[in-house]
Image (cartoon, grey):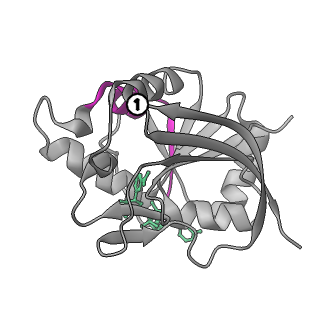
Amino acid sequence: MSATYTFDIFSSLDGYSNSRTFGGYFGKQGPELLDHRFDQYGEEQRLVLGANTYRAFASMLASSSAGSEVRDPWVTRMRNLPTTVLSNTLEGSLDWPDATVLSGDPVDAIARLKKESEVPLRSHGSLTLNRALLAAGLVDRVQVTLFPVITGQSGLGRIFQDAADFDLELLESRTLDGHTQELIYRPTLHT
Ligand SMILES: NC(=O)c1ccc[n+]([C@@H]2O[C@H](COP(=O)([O-])OP(=O)(O)OC[C@H]3O[C@@H](n4cnc5c(N)ncnc54)[C@H](OP(=O)(O)O)[C@@H]3O)[C@@H](O)[C@H]2O)c1
């Protein structure tokens, strides 16, 4: 049995992962979203990060103060999960409680990890990594948290830019705080 791999991503309606102006959660977080994330990250699982997402989180956490949104309880839970970071350049010990660096071809590394892992795998952000894994057919679930904004002027990081074409089967959906949608899909390559 292969471990389930979930690509967990926050998105604007127009498919951007970040914005120059809206800020974290595109400024639309609410208690239901934060509680739901806290529950999801309390499940037994392994976190998988691309090197840039790891660096971004590690540096934001290091420079943040108590009460900052980067220290929201679900983020603390995420940081405390057993974590695999895909990188051929990171060296030395990581600023993360239980992290291992996997080097080599990320697609081969994750194919192996899926066979070996006894717990589900979940990756947050990590766009480059997850585009490659999607194309290789290794992503079992795409979990998009769709925030109620259009970021036509300020959007950064088109999530599926240059990814392959996919058909999506909707597995779960929920509305959080009355305006944010969490959509969980099973992707299959469109042929
Ligand atoms: N919207 C959200 O939910 C969310 C959450 C977190 C982060 N983000 C955003 O996601 C972005 C980070 O994504 P990213 O695309 O820059 O990078 P990423 O996937 O986090 O990291 C890319 C790096 O990881 C290694 N890597 C992973 N997959 C690879 C592959 N297939 N081929 C070669 N190297 C691979 C390489 O590191 P080495 O060079 O060390 O080998 C590469 O430079 C940031 O803009 C961040 O703000 C969004």
Badge 1 density bin: few <14, some 14–19, many ≥20, Cα 10 Å: few
Is 154 left, or right, of 9 in this rendering? left
Q: Residue at image x 47%, y 29%?
A: 81
Q: Quick one: quadrant of the C terminus? A: bottom right
Disc 1 marks which amino acid?
Answer: Asp
Q: Position of residue 146 (x, y in %)?
A: 49, 49
Is residue 159 in sight in this rendering?
A: yes
Figure quadrant of residue 61: top left
- Number of numbered tags placed on the structure image: 1
Quarter in which the N terminus is drawn: top right
Chain part drawn in magenta: 72-88
> Horizontal and vertical percent for residue 6?
64, 43
Residue 111 position within the rendered picture, expressed as x and y whole percent measured from the top left: 75, 53
Residue 129 shown left or right of residue 99 in the figure = right
Q: Is residue 98 magenta?
A: no
Give the residue pinned by disc 1: 177
Left or right of 10 in this view: 136: right
